[in-house]
Amino acid sequence: MEIPYDHLEPDTLRALVEEYVTRAGTDYGEVEVPLPTKVRQVIARLERGEAVITYDPETKSCDIVPC
C-alpha cells in the first residue's frame, strides 16, 4: 500500500528517509555525500512524484521505491 509522503509528520518523514538512505547503501561515486544532502534528495524525489513510500502490512515495514 502506498503512503502519501505529505500525510506523514515532518519528523516521521525525515526519520523514515534517514533509515532508508542508511539502509540502501546507495553509491554516490567517489565523493561522499553527507546524510542531510541524501535526505533532501530523497524527499525531493518524493515531492516530484519520482518515488513513493510503500507499507507492507505483513512485514509491518516501509520502503521507498522509484515510480
Image (tube, rainbow, N blue to C red):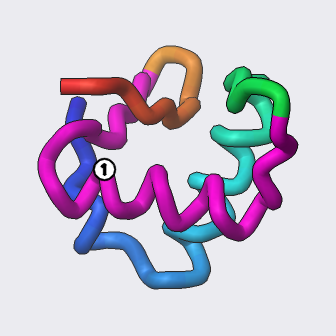
Q: Is residue 54 left or right of residue 41?
A: left
Splitting the image into 4 quarters, where does residue 57 fall? top left
Report the amino acid beneath label 1. Answer: Arg
Would residue 55 be counted in the magenta stretch? Answer: yes
Q: Position of residue 11 (x, y in %)?
A: 59, 81
Q: Disc count in the image?
A: 1
Q: Is residue 24 visible?
A: no
Residue furthest front in the image: 30
In this rendered view, identify the residue nearer to me: 29 or 58.
29
Residue furthest top in the image: 58
Q: Position of residue 40 (x, y in %)?
A: 52, 66
In this rendered view, identify the residue nearer to me: 64 or 33.
33
Splitting the image into 4 quarters, where does residue 64 fall? top left
Q: Is residue 53 left or right of residue 64?
A: left
Give the quadrant of the N terminus: top left
Q: Is residue 20 above or below residue 67?
A: below
Q: Is residue 60 above or below residue 14?
A: above
User: Which residue is disc 1 drawn over?
Assistant: 45
The residue stretch that appears in magenta? 31-57
Give the quadrant of the C terminus: top left
Q: Is residue 47 visible?
A: yes
Q: Is residue 6 above or below residue 65?
A: below
Dot 1 lies on which element?
A: helix
Residue at 83%, 28% in the rendered image: 30
Residue at 74%, 25% in the rendered image: 29
Would residue 53 be counted in the magenta stretch? Answer: yes
Residue at 24%, 72% in the rendered image: 6
Residue furthest bottom in the image: 10
